[in-house]
DNA sequence: TCCTTATTTGAAAGCGCTTACAGCCTATAT
DNA sequence: ATATAGGCTGTAAGCGCTTTCAAATAAGGA
């Protein structure tokens, strides 16, 4: 079954040079005369030789591959992120190994080790649960440990440490602005719905609370609801909810659509009787009717920027990058709000 | 920056055995006495040794890794597939390298080569555009070529060849049944909407046409519409469409929701004046209102089955598997049909 | 107890590539 | 013409692991 693969010795023999010379032309070393380079290249082209990555790796300890770790890829945001990350990485000649770790730190740690064991050149951790700010401490030591071996980029998470670089959305401002807008349009009983205690979820809540405070509206804990991340579950939870509200800010679009389903069930007019703002601007945001006003977190920018930074540390060894880069969000107005 | 990594020699020295013995216990060879195994294991645990995959690969030419190739991962179906594939692979101790190739054969070929150059143990190609049945010939030679090196599994595609194994949905039957049901409920002008000429799209159309024929309804080409895979685009295309129709069968849920948006715009009652059936049973199917009747293609079964088969050829060298396995679909009834 | 056979173990030869080092050859300067 | 530097090329030593083969040890039988 296995084809016999030709190796550097074959090429050397055919081109009548030493394997060292072949290696040099393959790696574009400048210490080769144009004549021999041509000669060797001709042979390589002819027989279609590709260096064995294992042997290369053994010497160089690298494979031009970066590891991407996501909690799950079965989620619109994550899959988009992976898509754009890998797309951008490819333009720099890097391939990617994917790991879906689940949401538990234990699984993450195991996957990080898996990726490291594959000798990736860098690690990209996507997912807001990689937190670590004062309020929301989580065990991120394994990330710092990983960073001793390869540069680590965290997308939408905040991890301090040497050789760790973060790219995050300006979630606070995004939600602050959206909430303020709701208030300007007369809403005072605004529900904040979230399904997680992740780094970004916390920032979103902060934006929500800040907006209320700045408009002299008291923050009421009963208006900050924790829900299950499923449309029907959200709808049902809301149906059982006793507090009155006339607007919803949700930490993702699925939850927001759940609120919309609630409105539909209660026959509330949207946006007149209930305004709704989602997050992520994903495809479900335009599947519903009326379509969902949502906050677009510019995943493309996010991913491209992340990769660019990463490459600059891998290739140029630039280690004095700013630790954290913030990407702004856009409010996309549609039918579930008056603005 | 780089930590000095301990290797098999260190372990051998610490455990006072030869590297051969260490290698044997690491690989679970049975030719090691329980006593020495314990001794070596203890050292390994203590210092946390992991074999260098490159060195392993150099000898074994494998990395316990399979390559997964999808046209795009920024698509609910694909990302789900990747998720379940990698999840199942993990249970067998395999990791995965991901490639997003785009839809062009050229990109696919390049990515296949990339994955092969990483010495994956097998290749999984997801995506219905890997066709190759009589009607829809496409250049799949590079797949057969790849199959000379490693087993290849094709999910939702049909590629003939040695060492190539396919797992496909029974799309013909699924659409046949759904269409028949629409007919039974009195619909005769049924629109079939698709965005691609992929292998499954063709099967779906076949099911649609077969159902019409079996109920003595003439197949009208103007009722088979090619659309752009975007909800709004579909809606607009339908608004400009001149033929009359009272039901829609769509080749995915996004398109179906587009039809629903059309109905909303035209103020048609769904399902009374327009019935709609989607495909994939994805999250957008429950985001809309009324919720979408959709065909669930059991992606989990599909992926698990694929991996199981693949493993049996990798590990047990079973090459006499049936070439193609067919997975049935389920019709999930919701609000856009009367059934 | 001694010899035969089975079971463990170790030494060493690769796997294919990179790269430090040395050697060779040509070109320039004396 | 001869010494000298500099550009190319080749030799060989790893990189860390697997595995064959032979040696060593343990076990079993007479």
Image (spheres, coloured by chain):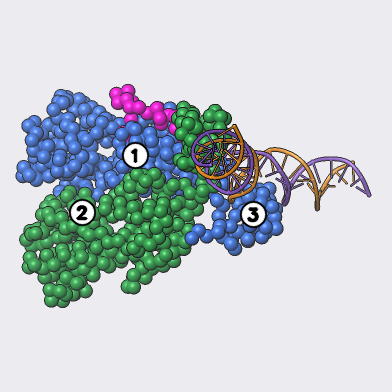
Chain colours: A blue, B green, C orange, D purple
Judge depth for marks 1 and 3 and give the one in front.
3
Taking the spot 21% from the left edge, 55% from the top edge, the residue there is B296
Choose top left, top right, bottom left or bottom right for residue A185: top left
Query: Which residue is nearer to you in this view: A82 or A246?
Result: A82
Q: Label 1 marks which chain's residue?
A: A
Q: Main secondary structure of the magenta part?
A: loop
Q: Which residue is mark 2?
A: B281
Residue at (30% x, 51% y) in the render? B304
Q: Position of residue A17 (x, y in %)?
A: 70, 55
Q: Is residue A124 above or below residue B318?
A: above
Residue range highlighted in magenta:
A128-151
Residue in the image at 20% along x and 63% along y: B174
Q: Mark 3 and mark 1 in contact (Cβ < 8 Å)? A: no
Residue B129 rendering spot, x and y as whole percentages? 34, 62
Which percent across, then down, holds residue D6? 76, 44
Q: Quadrant of the C terminus of chain B?
A: bottom left
Q: Is residue C13 left or right of residue C7?
A: right
Residue B300 magenta-highlighted: no
Residue mark closest to the camera, 3 vs 2: 3
Secondary structure, mark 2, is loop
The answer to whether one can see residue A177 in this image is no
Q: Are marks 2 and 1 in contact (CB under 8 Å)?
A: no
Q: Callout 2 environment at 10 Å: few (<14), some (14 to 19), or many (20+)?
A: many
Residue that badge 1 annotates: A101
- Quadrant location of residue A215? top left
Query: Which numbered marker is on residue B329?
Result: none
The subunit carrying tag 2 is B
- Residue A9's disc is 3
**Disc nearer the start of the sequence (1/3):** 3
B169 relative to B30 in the view: left or right: left
């Amino acid at each position: 079954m296995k084809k016999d693969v030709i190796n550097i010795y074959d090429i050397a023999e055919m081109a009548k040079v030493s394997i060292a010379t072949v290696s040099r032309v393959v790696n574009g070393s400048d210490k080769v005369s144009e004549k021999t380079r041509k000669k060797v290249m001709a042979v390589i082209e002819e027989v279609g030789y590709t260096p064995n990555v294992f042997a290369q790796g053994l010497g160089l300890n690298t494979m031009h591959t970066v590891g991407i770790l996501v909690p799950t890829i079965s989620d619109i945001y994550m899959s988009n992120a992976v898509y754009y990350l890998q797309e951008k990485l490819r333009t720099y000649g890097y391939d990617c190994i994917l790991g879906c770790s689940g949401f538990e730190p234990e699984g993450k740690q195991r996957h990080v080790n898996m990726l490291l064991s594959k000798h990736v050149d860098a690690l990209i951790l996507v997912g807001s649960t990689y937190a670590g700010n004062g309020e929301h401490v989580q065990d991120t030591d394994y990330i710092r440990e990983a960073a001793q071996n390869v540069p680590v980029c965290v997308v939408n998470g905040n991890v301090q440490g040497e050789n760790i670089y973060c790219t995050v959305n300006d979630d606070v401002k995004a939600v602050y602005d959206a909430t303020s807008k709701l208030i300007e349009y007369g809403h005072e009983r605004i529900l904040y719905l979230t399904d997680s205690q992740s780094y970004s979820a916390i920032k979103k809540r902060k934006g929500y609370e800040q907006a209320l405070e700045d408009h002299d509206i008291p923050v009421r804990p009963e208006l900050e609801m924790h829900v299950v991340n499923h449309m029907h579950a959200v709808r049902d939870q809301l149906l059982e909810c006793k507090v009155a509200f006339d607007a919803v800010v949700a930490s993702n679009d699925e939850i927001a659509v759940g609120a919309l389903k609630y409105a539909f069930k209660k026959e509330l007019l949207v946006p007149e009787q209930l305004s709704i703002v989602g997050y992520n601007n994903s495809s479900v945001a335009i599947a519903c009717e009326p379509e969902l006003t949502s906050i677009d977190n510019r995943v493309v920018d996010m991913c491209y920027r992340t990769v660019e930074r990463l490459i600059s540390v891998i290739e140029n060894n630039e280690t004095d990058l700013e630790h954290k880069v913030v990407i702004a969000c856009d409010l996309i107005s549609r039918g579930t709000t008056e603005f």
